[in-house]
Image (tube, grey):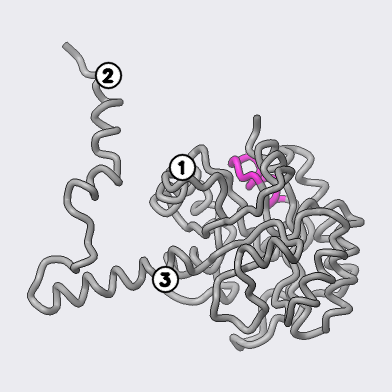
Amino acid sequence: MTPPERMRALLAAPDFVAMPAVWDGLSAKLTHAAGFKTAFLSGSCVAASRLGGPDLDLLSFAEMFSSLEMARGGAPGLLILADGDHGYGNAMNVRRTVRAYGRAGAAAVLIEDKITPRALSADGKPCLPREEARMKVRAAVDAARESGILVMARTDCRPTAGIDEALARIAMYVEEGADILFLDSPRDEDEVRRAVAASKGRPHFAVLSPGAPRETPTQARAAALGLKIGAFPTALLSPAIAGMKAGLAAIAAGGSEAASALAAGELRDTLGYGDYDKEARRFAGG
C-alpha cells in the first residue's frame, strides 16, 4: 500500500489518531520507534529547528521539502502529514507543492487560507477572500490525484472573521473534495462540535498542545467531541529545547553532561550504530 492508502486505512479505523510533531530524521525515527504510525511535519517545529525562531511564515517551500525528505529518510515507515502552509503562493504554487510532497512520499498535506506575506506583526491571521481560498483547495485536490496524497484544508479565519465564516469555509472545502478538515483556534467545545458537523463525516484535525488561546481538550475528550486527529507541535520540541538548555548549563558549570543525558550505550543504540554495522557486514569484502 502507498503512504496515502495506509493513511486512509488508519483514518477509517475507529481509534483516535495521536500525531506527534516532527521536524527531521531523528525526531521522525524516535516517533516511529515509540510505536506511532503517523506524525505531523510541523511548520512551527521546522521553523524552530532551521531558523531558531517562531513560525511566522518565513520558511520557504525548499526548506519544508528538505525537512520532509529528512523525516522520510529517518523513518521510511512513518506516515507523514506534511505542513504545506499556504502553498507558497497562488493556486499554481499550491499545485506544485502538493505534487512535490506526494512524489516525495508524504501521506497527506496541509493547505491553509491565510494571507501571505503576513502583516509585519506576530498578531492575527488575516485570510484570503473566500473564493480565492476555494481555488487553492481546488488546486490542491486536483494535484493530489497524481499520487493519491490526502489534502487537509485548514481555515485560520476564526479569530479575524468569526466562527460562522470559518464554518462556511469548512463546508466549502468539503464540497471541493478535501479529505481532512481543520478549524484553527476554536474558542470552546461548542465551536469544535460545529466544526466537526460541518466536516460532514470527514476526519477533523485539531492541535492539542497546551498554551495557545484556543480550546485544547484531552485526547479522550477530543475523541468524544468527534475529532479524529490530534497533533502535538510542542510535545517533542519543548523537551528537546529543555534538554539542550540542561546540557549547556552542565557544561557552563564545569561538567560534561546533564543529569538527564542518555547513557553512552543507549545513545549509540538509539542512533543506530549497531544497525549500521549489521547492514555493513553484508558488503564487507574477504
Which is nearer the N-term, disc 2 or disc 3? 3
Q: Where does label 2 land, which residue?
A: 283
Q: Where does label 3 land, which residue?
A: 238
x%, y% of residue 210? 55, 76
Which is nearer the N-term, disc 2 or disc 1? 1
Which element type, helix, strand or loop, lies under badge 1? Answer: loop
The amino acid on which the numbered mark 1 sits, given as a three-letter code, is: Ala
x%, y% of residue 28? 46, 50
C-alpha gap between disc 2 and disc 1? 23 Å
Q: Which mark is in front, 2 or 3?
A: 3
Decide if residue 113 is in sight here. no
The amino acid on which the numbered mark 2 sits, given as a three-letter code, is: Phe
Badge 2 density bin: few <14, some 14–19, many ≥20, Cα 10 Å: few
Q: Residue drawn at (50%, 52%), measured in percent from left and top?
A: 66
Q: Residue drawn at (67%, 67%), measured in percent from left and top?
A: 221
Which element type, helix, strand or loop, lies under badge 3? Answer: helix
Q: Which mark is in front, 2 or 1?
A: 1
Q: Is residue 67 magenta?
A: no
The amino acid on which the numbered mark 3 sits, given as a three-letter code, is: Ser
C-alpha gap between disc 2 and disc 3? 40 Å
Q: Taking 248 as reference, is 27 left or right?
A: right
Q: Where does label 1 land, which residue?
A: 75
The residue stretch that appears in magenta: 96-107
Which element type, helix, strand or loop, lies under badge 2? Answer: helix
Q: Residue drawn at (66%, 80%), measured in percent from left and top?
A: 214
